[in-house]
Image (spheres, helix red, strand yellow):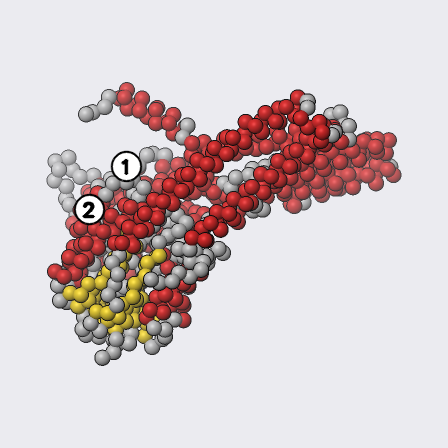
Amino acid sequence: MRRTEGEHVREKRTARWAGAVRPARLRDGPWAVRWLVAVRASVAAALAWQLCSSVWGTPRPAPAVVAALLVVHPTVFRSCTAGLQYAAGCSLGALIALPAAVLVGPTWLSMSAVLLLSLLAAGHERLGAHGLHVPITAVFVLLLGPSHAREIGPHLLQIGVGISVAVLFNALLPPPLRLRAAETALDRLRAELAGVLDGVADAVRKARHPDDVLDPDWRDRLAELTAQARSALGQAHESLRWNVRAPNRHTVWHLDQRVLESLERVAHDAEAVVAALDDLAAQRPAAVAPDPYGTARTDAWDQEFRAGYGRLLTCLALCVRGCRGGSPHPVLPATRRVWRELAERCGDRHDSLDARLAECRLLMLLDRSLQHVAGGRHRTARAPRSRTATAELTVVAGETREETHAQADARHR
Amino acid sequence: MRKLMPGTAEHPAGHTRTRCALLLPRALFVLAFALFVLAIVAVSIGSPNRLTTGPVSEAAVCTALAVAPVAVVGEAVRQRRRRALNRADTSAATAQRVLLRPLPGRIGDLRLRGTYLPARTAPRSGGDLYDAVRSPYGTRLLIGDVRAKGMLAVEASAVLLRAFREAAYEEETLSEVARRLEGDARRHIARLPGAETPERFATALLVEIPSGPVARVVHCGHPEPLLVRDGRVRVCPPERPGAPIGMADLVGAGHAVHTLPFRAGERLVLYTDGFTEARDAAGRFLPFAERVAERAAAPLDDLADGLRADLVRHTGGELRDDAALLAVERVPG
């Protein structure tokens, strides 16, 4: 039964809403982190406020609240680092300004000197974004001066309490490990990249341009998914650091940075393959645009090459789906064998120079991608022929170079 | 009945210990956090005696009373789901064990020993298979790994084993046996229900050992066999690797026969990726070929048992994938 356009749109909308409220998506999405940080920061700030006001009788312990809010982060590691940086920034600022405040007081000269020193200290990479608190604290200490010395101590103490409460809060109630989000992001990237390769394979077989088969924005989507995966992977590894839950989860090998790097390289190669296909189409326009009477001059070799190359791209897509660290996909050794056979046939051809160059470029790009997804754990016996496939390609490239030189010589003569 | 070693994957005490080890830190964290919050509330109120008075304390008590049952129910649901998954996994592992009939200790001048270890930590049991058949063309061996999980993998394994047992008797060449397996896989495995595995295929290694001093091998995307000769281990990678069973049409690569010298006193070790992909707590792979070399001089039974023990020791009993091993030795005379 054929569906109407309205039904299709309604179905898509329903699917979008269903996808939006899916628990896994809620759990792994950016809003989960925002909620987590917001709730934790609010509770930590409230606890810091309560502690300062009840123990020291401070009516409005704002520094403690601000410190607690700034120190709560999605991971234990970042929370502890931020706490240390914040404390170090405030202490440094106070130390820089205190001698000037006691000896000279707030004059333009002392202010300039304190600002210069504090800004230099703020630039230290160890302080990170919290380096900003060095000049701010220094200016406050200098302006308040010795007359308000009684206020500076409690102020710094409140900051210390806020930092301690926030760090303890994050350490005792450790944030979740962000592993599932990274797994999902990598899975999405794998699926998208494999889909792109399948689409390119389809286009190669049908002698069409890949952009006609794929979505027009496939490159942007791949780049976006790669960036998401990189961010999610970074968060996952950071969430493991100093997290007491981490020892229970020691099976995170599939979240290897090298897996992402391999996928990124294959994505770049896929773009290069599409560009190289343009070159091939330029050399054999008849195969791409058959004549309107349906009696296109069919090039048997071109059809064979396209069928073989499309098959190899499909196998590469399978390897991309199985690229999870460890051993490569079991289809890889056979794919390399098929690649070698195609390369040998390509090397035996005596076609036009430019067409052969385009084919060789396509094969070399595919060879590189297969190496990326192999992950360094692939082993095959030496081919029975003394001339390996890569050597074949090198020889072809050498022959084409010689032919180019010969043609240039002839033109020169 | 074979005695189980302490700390092996099959030991039930290890399971209880793991559960306790998982629950204890969680309970300690909850306790520590509750004490932390209570301490702050007590300090802020001024006296621990006034904990149950005042609006803040009332709110805290109400929240605790509301959250505690929800947390308990949530944990109970999680435990129940985990138990159900474990039960399903155990069933699949048991079915797979039943499917792998015990190998005869000896066929002609060959001695055989097989071992199978189901996965422990993930629902991945089922799928590894091996068998040996004495045919008119020599002894034929199969070791394979079906890419599926649970009962689906068991069903696919049954399909492949049945096809192998028939084809090994009937077909003259090993490549024809592989072709028959390919056909059966295309007809049956690809149509099995279940959507958790998008790719349906099996890796396999077919070995034919005739009476002469050779062994013929057909690779179908499976890890290479190890040849043990004079105490040395040699990996035998294929010259023309074949596609996994069920993918030959897709790849366009037929199955080629690879001949190895296999004389009296030599051994062939066939294995699945459960052995080579096993990692320890630090993420290091099991150096399988080295372990085989260390045990090369041991009797065949000790070799298989030792490799099995090495695997369990290396992973700490937490096998994430099935592992199967088939060791063959040509006896002199």
Q: Chain of mark 2?
A: B
Q: Residue at x 86, y 31 (%)?
A: A147
- For badge 1, the amino acid type reads Val
Which amino acid type is shown beneath numbered disc 2? Answer: His
Vertical comparison of A61 with A110: above or below: above
Which residue is most to the bottom?
A: B333
Q: Who's the residue at 41% across and 49% down the image?
A: B121
Does residue B110 lie above or below A228 as drawn?
Answer: below
Q: Residue furthest front?
A: B1
User: Within 10 angstroms of label 1, few (less than 14), some, or many (20 or more) residues?
Assistant: some
Label 1, secondary structure: give it.
helix
Residue A358 coordinates in the image, percent (x, y): 29, 50
Label at residue B188: 2
Q: Quadrant of the N terminus of chain A?
A: top left
Q: Left or right of A8: which side holds A1?
A: left
Q: Does residue A381 appear left or right of residue A222 in this picture?
A: left
Indicate whether A43 appears above or below B282.
Answer: above
- Label drawn at residue A213: 1
Frontmost residue, A182 versus A343: A182
In the rendered image of this protein, does residue B155 appear above or below residue B104? above
